[in-house]
Image (cartoon, rainbow, N blue to C red):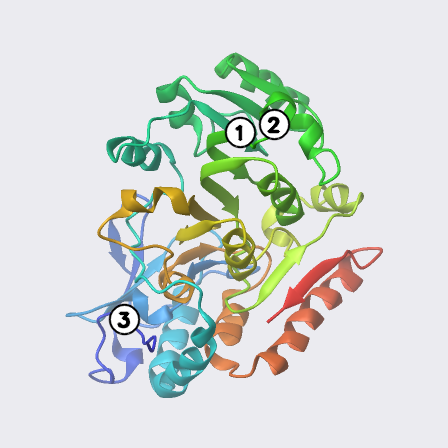
Amino acid sequence: QVLVARAGAPAIAPGPLSTLGVHRVAMDGSTTDIGARSAAPERMCDLQGLHQPAEALQPGDWQILASELDDSEPAEELSVAIEDFLSHKDEYRDTLARSSARRIGSERCHPTLVDTQNIWPTVDRFRSAGFPVLGRYINIGAHDGQNDDPLFEYATQAGAIGVAVERDPERCERHRQALPNVRVACEAVTPQNVLALMGELVTEPPTWVDVLKVDIDSYDCPVLEVLLGAVRARVVLVEANPSIPPPYQWAMLHHPELWDFFNSFHSPEEVPIRGCSLAYEVDLLRRFGYDFVAFGGHDAIFTHSSVREAWHPLRPPMDEFDCYNEAFIAANGIPIGKTRRWFFEMNDTQEALPEIWAFFADWMQANARRLFPFALRG
């Protein structure tokens, strides 16, 4: 298979791209004509947008849709990115053909298959396929269990019990009030203490749960790896750092000062050294019997191979390059232009790896007192 730009756009634009209309998309879905190559307001960074810029082109009328989110890619820069993408489409296609030859999944991505912000429809799908709801779950990085938590509807609909881990005392108390059936461990989680925090859910043979979620904005994958060896879940939801494209496997490792350093920033969007890349997660979870099924924003969804028939006629795992190519991302401290370079332009992983390593090392040297440990391989 060869991945190509699938924006519905022809190979060559019907005229200079600078003459195309640009529309800004509001949160309610309405659009406003802001002119061709309209100047965008000054921004510190461009962190939100489509990996594949030509996806912003509307086939048929060739309008460019630019998001109005505060830290999204400005319309001016988006139009330049589209022009670059279309003028280099053949070499970018060849780059993806080479790098994606190492894909793990082969099923075409279905962006609407799974809602990464609400896990209940997925659990309900399994129930309809003959897999009863277990009513047990694990939520690492639970916040207050309600706001922006993709497990909240599942927890309430299923009347589920389980363990939630959250380090902030005020959030812990709100969580206990909202979901009294769930035991809240109100302390910092590490790879060393996570199993002790799980209590009765760590058994031999391993206990099955409906959902395992890890979202701690730091060393997520080391914590997840320990849990995968001790529990079994039908669904795993883990935050992914969307700025590092496949095939690059990158992950922050545990350091006792990492969270305090991260928390010293006013806005988490400023900090690139958190979480792990999609490719790292795909490889890690595959080793424990999980299929990759969805990616969007900054979350990835995996389901256990034992429930594959619930996805019929689809055959997971999904193609991680395909899903990444189509995703709208909310990045972490890395401009989307750099992500596109690593994904579309760099055709040799041995050249890209030193550049990616240098980006993180240079950022830490400029912003931290030390180099925090991270893993990187291609």
Foreground of the two, 37 or 229: 229
Labels 1 & 2 near each other (Cβ < 8 A)? yes
Residue carrying label 1 = 207
Point out the residue furthest to the right here.
369
Name the kind of residue labelled 2 in the image: Thr
Q: CA distance from mark 3 to mark 2?
A: 46 Å
Residue carrying label 2 = 203
Labels 1 & 3 near each other (Cβ < 8 A)? no
Residue 47 place in picture, x, y as percent: 51, 58
Foreground of the two, 337 or 193: 193
Quadrant location of the N terminus? bottom left
Name the kind of residue labelled 1 in the image: Thr
Quadrant location of the C terminus? bottom right
Q: Is residue 50 above or below residue 237?
A: below
Label total for image: 3
Foreground of the two, 298 or 246: 246
Name the kind of residue labelled 3 in the image: Arg
Residue 57 place in picture, x, y as percent: 27, 68
Q: Is residue 263 visible?
A: yes
Label 3 environment density (alpha carbons within 10 Å; few <14, some 14–19, many ≥20): few
Q: Secondary structure at mark 2?
A: loop
Labels 3 & 2 near each other (Cβ < 8 A)? no
- From the viewer's perspective, tell me whether residue 327 is left or right of residue 247: left
Of callouts 3 and 2, the N-terminal one: 3
Residue carrying label 3 = 6
